[in-house]
Amino acid sequence: MLTVKDLAVNYGAIQAVKGVSFEVHRGEIVTLIGANGAGKSTLLKTISGLMRPKAGQITYLERPLDRLSAPQIVRAGISQVPEGRHIFPGLSVQENLQMGAFGQRDRAVFNETLQTVYDYFPILKKRRTQDAATLSGGEQQMLAMGRALMAHPQLMLLDEPSMGLAPIFIQEIFTIIQAINQAGTTVLLIEQNARQALKIADRGYVLASGQVKLSGSGAALLANPDVQRAYLGG
Ligand code: ATP
């Protein structure tokens, strides 16, 4: 579904991604794990069109993505849930969700999608008229995921969804990611919480210093002594 080949991305003179290749197949949950600064966020931003590659190719459903704008990439079926949520303060929860449905003019489809999002996240329905800025961190993460779902993605990109959340919310977010995947959305998940991410992933890639160092099934990487030592706390 998504093929990233020999991708290189720079910030000025800094090489953040140095020739990375990986694949995401339809229906999978694939995770990219790695320490701070490994290049994970840069990779995701490049796939979603927020940054341009210096070299390499990104192909989605046999089409090159590199020349599409970020809105065109969303319309092609890829939605990103950004690191830090980036919800719109001053707008209600429901208005935030509406922002994710841009381009959707059919009221019936919109209402149906909204209901699906509220089924995943009942707390958002309860808080739908509330200013999004008043939500807790976990609720804001749910809102960011709900907003991405409003665009009907075939592929959902998640950047550190568990960051800064209480353990009870972390568990809930990972359970919902699995449910979204089982309902048909392919998932590319970036996480520092490597244990949780590998547990739900079909496959994973370990990134370090802008390069892929290891790859394998989620279970194989969880069992790998090097991965355990470096990313799973021994
Ligand atoms: P984190 O979990 O901390 O976000 P990451 O694996 O997502 O880490 P990136 O944010 O992609 O890593 O960063 C990769 C490299 O690019 C790092 O060396 C980082 O310092 C550098 N970098 C990231 N953003 C910028 C920027 N705006 N300007 C210059 N260098 C940057």
Image (cartoon, rainbow, N blue to C red):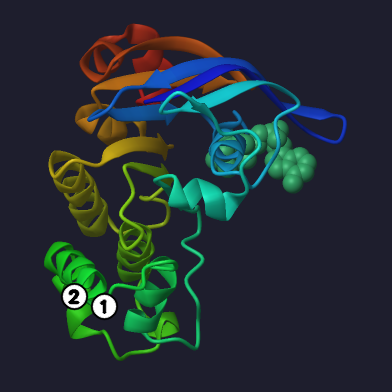
- Expressed as whole percent of the image width and height from the top left, the position of residue 190 reads 43, 37
Q: Residue at 38% of width from left, 63% of height from top?
A: 144
Q: Residue at 87% of width from left, 30% of height from top?
A: 13
Point out the frontmost of discs 1 and 2: 1
- Expressed as whole percent of the image width and height from the top left, the position of residue 213 reads 51, 10
Write down the residue under mark 1. 107
Vertical side of 84 occupied by 159: above or below? above
* Amino acid at circle 1: Arg
Ligand 1 lies in which image quarter?
A: top right
Q: Residue at 47% of width from left, 71% of height from top?
A: 87
Marks 1 and 2 close (CB-CB < 8 Å): no
Write down the residue under mark 2. 123
Vertical side of 170 occupied by 108: above or below? below
The quadrant in which the C terminus is found is: top left
Q: Nearer the viewer, residue 53 or 112?
A: 112
Q: Nearer the viewer, residue 122 or 53?
A: 53
> Which mark sits nearer the N-terminus, 1 or 2?
1
The quadrant in which the N terminus is found is: top left
* SS type, badge 1: helix
Decide if residue 36 is in sight here: no
- Expressed as whole percent of the image width and height from the top left, the position of residue 223 reads 24, 12
Q: Is residue 121 left or right of residue 43?
A: left
